[in-house]
Image (cartoon, rainbow, N blue to C red):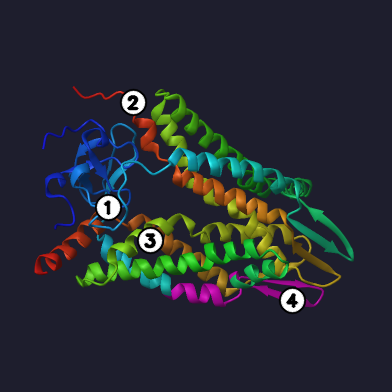
Amino acid sequence: MGVKTGISAAKQQLISCHDCHALWPVEEAPGHCARCGSRLHLRKPAAMTRTWALLLTSAFLLLPANLLPIMQITSLGRGEPATIIGGILELTQHGLYGIAFIVFLASLLIPIGKLCGLLIMLFTLQMGWTTNMQQKMLMFRMVHWIGRWSMLDIFVVAVLVSLVQMGNLAQISGQQGTTAFAGVVICTMLAANTFDTRLIWDRYPDESS
Amino acid sequence: MPTTHPDYRHLIACNECDLLLHRPVIRISQTARCPRCQSVLISARANSIERSLALACAGLILILPANLYPLLTLELLGQSRSETIFSSAMALFQDGLWGVSLLVLLFTILVPICKLCLLFWVSLGLQMRWSLPGLSFALRSYLHLDEWGMLEVYLVGVLVSVVKLAAMASLEPGPGLFCLAALILVTTLSSSMLDKDLFWARIEALQEPDQDGR
């Protein structure tokens, strides 16, 4: 077994299981990992195609998510639709800057930041850039970790809709914008999952002697 | 056939950059990182299996009151209305947003319950050294479900709603809110206490005598 450390496992015909990290030589590898039962691949299958598809879907969904109202607020018989940006502006008008900032972060900055982060990763992979690798990995880990927090606005709408049901006095109902927004969040989370960071390291020159 | 290849047990490949390394020997509460991409290779936790079992039990107990008791009660001109996690998902359903309501149901009720049950099953099997069926499938599912449980995001959502509504009505926190907070503490602790490498190694140790006997 002439394997050397300090070189990527795949270059030495070793498959590392994606789930339990057991190592298998390519020629003897079973179809599924004998320890955890996960299907063995050298790299996640069609990683770049799937990530691009999910990324484009979420980029398109970003438009209806921000343009369509996420809820309809009716008070004293007078109804008005509320969008995500409208909700943030309303919070700042009431002087609630802290909460406005949290909602701004979760509903606007994080989804757009995630899209940009994943775009950078995809371009890195496509162009074969090997500079600032550690920074890129750090960014990718941030994108991966922070994704779920974008669901915040959906949960706020869910809580408001179930609490404010006072007939003509005050009534809040959910609108179609939430579906599009939830789509953005799910697609970016899935896109981060289908991406395989090992692919961008495959072009990286080995440091070993 | 053994469950891992004997020639390569002393090696480990980085999960994020695929660099092949000698498996580091680390002490309790130490973490080994990949020298090339700085991702976590393995992290040892003290009494990981016992603590996971204890936290899974605590979580399974807490998840009942967190879902059954009201989280918030709103009072406005003599009318009052309470809210639970389930009722907030149903409210979206009644507005015709069945997709979003299904997602809320999944991320805040079904996934957390599944995660706790799976963690209980795996840590019970490993703690008692019982070769329970589906241990490796349960651990694999748990690790995949991990990021889709969003209780803490929901709790922040409840707090944002409180701030939004505080100006127009009086709000009362219910017992469910405190149970939810405790549940989040338990699930967060259980994620940080899980020593994946140890769990896989122990599952392997449980599987092997079985397969020799066949």
Q: Which mark is residue A204?
A: 2
> Can residue B55 be seen?
no
Pointer 3 residue: B142
Pointer 1 residue: A31
Number of other residues with Cα within 10 Å of mark 1, as a class: few under 14, some 14 to 19, many 20 or more: few
Of all chains, the one bearing label 2 is: A
Report whether mark 2 lies on the same chain as mark 1.
Answer: yes
Report whether mark 2 lies on the same chain as mark 4.
Answer: no
- Magenta stretch contains residue B77: yes
Which residue is nearer to you in this view: B175 or B109?
Answer: B109
Which mark sits nearer the N-terminus, 2 or 1? 1
Q: CA distance from mark 4 to mark 3?
A: 39 Å
- Magenta stretch contains residue A90: no
Number of other residues with Cα within 10 Å of mark 3, as a class: few under 14, some 14 to 19, many 20 or more: many
Residue lying at the far right in this picture: please name it: A77
Residue type highlighted by circle 4: Ser
